[in-house]
Image (spheres, helix red, strand yellow):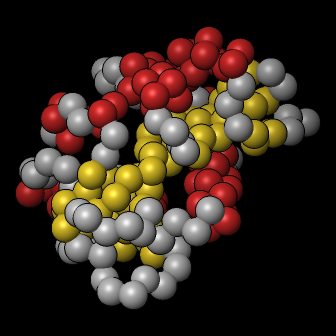
Amino acid sequence: MTETIRVRPPQDGDDAGLARLYPRAFPGEDLLPLVMRLHREVPGLVALVACAGEAVVGHVAFTPCFVGARSEGVALLGPLAVQPAWQGRGIGSNLVRRGLAALRAEDVAAVLVLGDPAYYGRFGFGAETRILPPYDLPPEWRDAWQSLGLRPVPAPLAGRLSLPPPWQAPALWAP
């Protein structure tokens, strides 16, 4: 029998589940401090967890940010994590789709992501060249910088992405 997965906003008691999730989903990377800072410090963060029973098996965050001096809000998708034993079951896709729906409801103009083009392309993301990441990316990562427009804007968004402090560590943007 397949266990039902519930998707909901994070709750105070989820910290231990997130602490188990991130080291398993990203061995060799320490993304947990970023996730915790995003949850504590970033107003307007859209975050969701996927739960099997009481266990957190997935998580996604969408950080509000801006492009240059433009007033249209955009969001950065990431991190997205699913417990390895639960991968391949559509949990990550469900988290992304629900997060995008929440952002559309908040009238966010666009979403950016640094990730696998084959994976994020299924949601409509495509290569981004007008909006620059906060730090220069290595050449092999350029195709991984992608965007998805959620609504029309009066003029194309262009310029450097401005992010809140948790994302301003250069190590997050380097191999």
> Where the C terminus falls, by quadrant?
top left
State which quadrant residue 156 falls in.
bottom left
Please identify the residue farthest to the top as the structure is shown.
16
Q: Residue at x 84, y 25 (%)?
A: 53
Percent x, y of residue 98: 68, 56
Side of 133 where 113 appears, left or right: right
Q: How many marks?
A: 0
> Where the N terminus falls, by quadrant?
top right
Q: Residue at x 26, y 64 (%)?
A: 69
> Is the residue 128 above or below the residue 91 in the image?
below
Percent x, y of residue 116: 36, 56
* Residue 175 in sight in this render: no
* Residue 37 in sight in this render: yes
Q: Residue at x 16, y 35 (%)?
A: 170
> Is the residue 29 above or below the residue 95 in the image?
above
Percent x, y of residue 159: 19, 67
Side of 11 where 21 appears, left or right: left
Q: Residue at x 80, y 21 (%)?
A: 54
Percent x, y of residue 171: 18, 31
> Is the residue 66 above or below the residue 175 in the image?
below
Side of 111 where 102 appears, left or right: right
Please identify the residue farthest to the right as the structure is shown.
1
Which of the pair 162/78 is nearer the observer? 162
